[in-house]
Amino acid sequence: MRNPDWLERGSAVSLSVIVAGLISFLAIAVGLALDFGRQQARLQMITDLAALAGSDSRIGIIAGYPCPNAAELARVNGANLDSCRIVGGVVSVSAGMNYLGLALTASAEAAQKD
């Protein structure tokens, strides 16, 4: 039994709307995934710089104390310094930030070459 013609009218429009919605959803998902990776890379760079600032402070290249300098560098770049340790000549830091409700973390170490 065949459906009446009036039931089939407009089906191309609804299919087009569904396909457009799926493409939009996928584009947004890919964009968010790429931006998440960019934010993680940015946090790692901030953490690396904080470790270097702490190491430079430890040997006197930068005035001040290592951990407060590392915390300040992380703060002005939008991250929170979670931990800072100095063991021997190595400054180890861990930092984090929130991005779209997700917690991002990174860690780094820096030491001066003797």
Image (tube, rainbow, N blue to C red):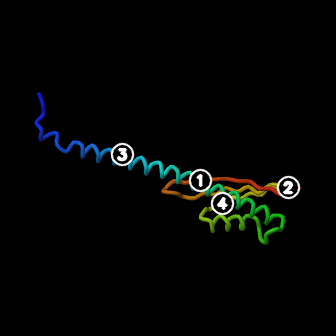
Q: Are marks 2 and 3 in contact (CB under 8 Å)?
A: no
Find residue 113 and name its label. 2
Where does label 4 land, which residue?
Answer: 46
Q: Which class describes the residues within 10 Å of circle 1: few (<14), some (14-19), or many (20+)?
A: some
Q: Earlier in the sequence, mark 2 or mark 4?
A: 4
Where does label 3 land, which residue?
Answer: 22
Residue shown at 52% from the left, 57% from the top: 99
Residue shown at 56% from the left, 51% from the top: 37
Mark 4 → mark 3, Cα distance in angstroms: 36 Å
Q: Earlier in the sequence, mark 4 or mark 3?
A: 3
How many marks overall? 4
Mark 2 → mark 3, Cα distance in angstroms: 54 Å
Mark 2 → mark 1, Cα distance in angstroms: 28 Å
Residue at the extreme bottom: 63
Where does label 1 land, which residue?
Answer: 40
Instruction: Tell me the mark number nearer the camera, choosing from 4 and 3.
Output: 3
What secondary structure is marked by label 4?
A: helix
**Amino acid at pointer 2:** Lys
Q: Earlier in the sequence, mark 2 or mark 1?
A: 1
**Amino acid at pointer 1:** Gln
What secondary structure is marked by label 2?
A: loop
Q: Position of residue 67 (x, y in %)?
A: 73, 64
Q: Which class describes the residues within 10 Å of circle 4: few (<14), some (14-19), or many (20+)?
A: many
What secondary structure is marked by label 1?
A: helix
Q: Position of residue 35 (x, y in %)?
A: 52, 54
**Amino acid at pointer 4:** Ile
Q: Are marks 4 and 3 in contact (CB under 8 Å)?
A: no
Q: Position of residue 94 (x, y in %)?
A: 67, 55
